[in-house]
Image (cartoon, rainbow, N blue to C red):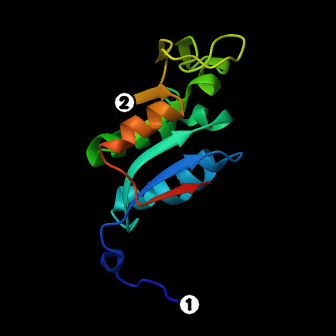
């Protein structure tokens, strides 16, 4: 097994994280990834983070993890996006789903949705929005936690 002892050995790999499992944002991001990003020891360039289900709650305005993450995201140019349907269901967005209508049918024109009561810099979207946003700075790896 190879363990990088010098974080520069990894090079300039770019990753995006998808927080899909329960507590992946509050625990894995909050207790592992975020402290490493703050200390400059994470070892890769993080280009984006996408939040599903209850993981969107760390992006609430005033949440300690979310406020720290917003600062790091601003400093390190990290995309922060939460799932439109997840955010709407949890009252962290207002409007309508981006790429499906109220009956669950796909749409060709995106609906309007915007974040509410979230930390600075958070976007709301669905997969087409995530792909478009990351196309400007594509990751080498996508890691789902």
> Between residues 130 and 36, which one lies in front from this camera angle?
130
Q: Residue at x 54, y 57 (%)?
A: 143
User: Is residue 119 shown to the viewer in this render?
Assistant: no
Q: Residue at x 30, y 40 (%)?
A: 74
Q: Quadrant of residue 53?
A: top right
Nearest to the eye among marks 1 and 2: give it.
1
Whether 93 is drawn above or below 30: the answer is above
Whether 67 is drawn above or below 98: the answer is below
Whether 86 is drawn above or below 44: the answer is above
> Between residues 134 and 39, which one lies in front from this camera angle?
134
Quarter of the image with the C terminus is bottom right
Is residue 48 found left or right of 9 in the rendered image? Answer: right
Check disc 2 and report the residue beneath it. Answer: 121
Q: Residue at x 64, y 27 (%)?
A: 86
User: Is residue 71 shown to the viewer in this render?
Assistant: yes
Check disc 1 and report the residue beneath it. Answer: 1
Q: Quadrant of residue 105?
A: top right
Secondary structure of the residue carrying tag 1 is: loop
Could you say where residue 76 lies in the image, as x and y percent from the top left?
29, 49
Q: Are marks 1 and 2 in contact (CB under 8 Å)?
A: no
Mark 2 neighbour class, 10 Å CA radius: few under 14, some 14 to 19, many 20 or more: some
């Amino acid at each position: 097994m190879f363990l990088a002892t010098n974080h520069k050995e990894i090079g300039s790999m770019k990753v995006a994280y998808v927080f899909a499992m329960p507590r992946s944002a509050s625990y894995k991001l909050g207790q592992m990834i975020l402290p490493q990003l703050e200390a400059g020891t994470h070892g890769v360039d993080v280009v984006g983070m996408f939040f599903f289900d209850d993981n969107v709650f760390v992006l609430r305005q005033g949440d300690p993890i979310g406020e720290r993450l917003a600062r790091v995201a601003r400093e390190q140019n990290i995309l922060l996006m939460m799932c439109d349907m997840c955010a709407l269901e949890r009252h962290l967005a207002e409007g309508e789903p981006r790429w499906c209508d109220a009956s669950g049918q796909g749409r060709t024109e995106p609906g309007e949705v915007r974040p509410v009561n979230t930390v600075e810099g958070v976007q709301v979207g669905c997969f087409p929005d995530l792909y478009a946003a990351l196309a400007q700075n594509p990751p080498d790896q996508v890691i789902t936690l």
